[in-house]
Amino acid sequence: MWEYIFDYQQRQILQDKLNMNELCLLFYFSKQIIDQEFLEAQNPSQYKDFLYVDIVKALPILNIETKQLKNLINKLLATGYIKKQKLFAGASISLTFKALNCLSKKQSEEPGNKKYFFLLKWKNISTLQNETGKKFPSFYSYYLFNTKNNYIYNNINNLNTEEDIKCNSNIINSENDKKFNLLLPLFEKFPKFKTKMLDDIELPQDFDCNKLIQAVDDSCFLKNKIGIKFLINHYNYVLRGDYMGDKLVADKKDVGIQKAFIGRNYSEEELNGLFDNIDEINL
């Protein structure tokens, strides 16, 4: 007995009592949903719309009418290979983990099938996160993170239960994880800055951690007198070299003066007033 038919495990297909027309239709849905557009999209859709008349025209080999086609779709739905949403004169179709589970090893390793697998996982995890009020990254960020870190399932046949999905939801649980990873070289170089409390910090679009590390390394003040929030909020001034030098400011009032200057262009009159009222500086 052939192990695979249309790249699907024949043993599973027989167990679910799918006939060749139903298997052919499943194959058609898979190729239409996971197409070139899907591969190129940053945030692809899980579902794709199909009109009954278009399916019948595309698959004359089935030799069926619309009513028979509906029966085939319902069989795939009942056996768990697809999900369906209502559509006028057609159906919006999604594949399932089971449909991917039945693929041969070679097909399961194809980029499109891997990407769709991660899309299904992302949908499930993000839904669970939303129910608890937690933020979850976009699919594109989630997909890049997994592929970049080799978090690729070598065997898609290992289906995850809802409990598995909950456990894996910590892979990327917020935007702070991405911030932390970008800042990791700085944390390793200067452990005093290390923190995961990054809610109030927004990294600049042109953020370069290596340049930031160099700027901190060149400044006794930055290395010893400020924290990560100050460092990031005044990133441009730090890189510009406003705090370079070997002098370590020891007096809190002097530190206050330096903080007061940041991010503002003072007039001469304001500068004089600032130094006249140094004791009033709010540290």
Image (spheres, rainbow, N blue to C red):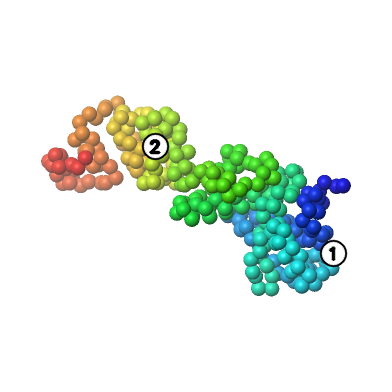
The image quadrant that residue 185 belongs to is top left
Which secondary structure lies at badge 1? helix
Can I make out residue 95 in this image? yes
**Left or right: 251, with 246 as reference point:** left
Residue depicted at x 69% and y 52%: 98
Judge whether residue 39 can be spotted in this image: no
For image coordinates 12% across by 41% down, the residue present is 276
- Reading the image, the residue beneath label 1 is 61
Q: CA distance from mark 2 to mark 1?
A: 62 Å
Which quadrant of the figure contains the C terminus?
top left
Is residue 218 placed above or below 181 in the rendered structure?
Answer: above
Q: Position of residue 63 (x, y in %)?
A: 84, 68
Q: Is residue 178 left or right of residue 257?
A: right
- Residue 88: x %, y % from top left: 66, 73
Q: Where does residue 175 sit, x and y in percent of width and height?
A: 46, 47
The residue to which callout 2 is attached is 195
Dot 1 amino acid type: Ile
Quadrant in the picture for residue 93: bottom right
Q: Is residue 12 left or right of residue 155?
A: right
**Which mark sits nearer the N-terminus, 2 or 1?**
1
Q: Is residue 174 above or below residue 26?
A: above
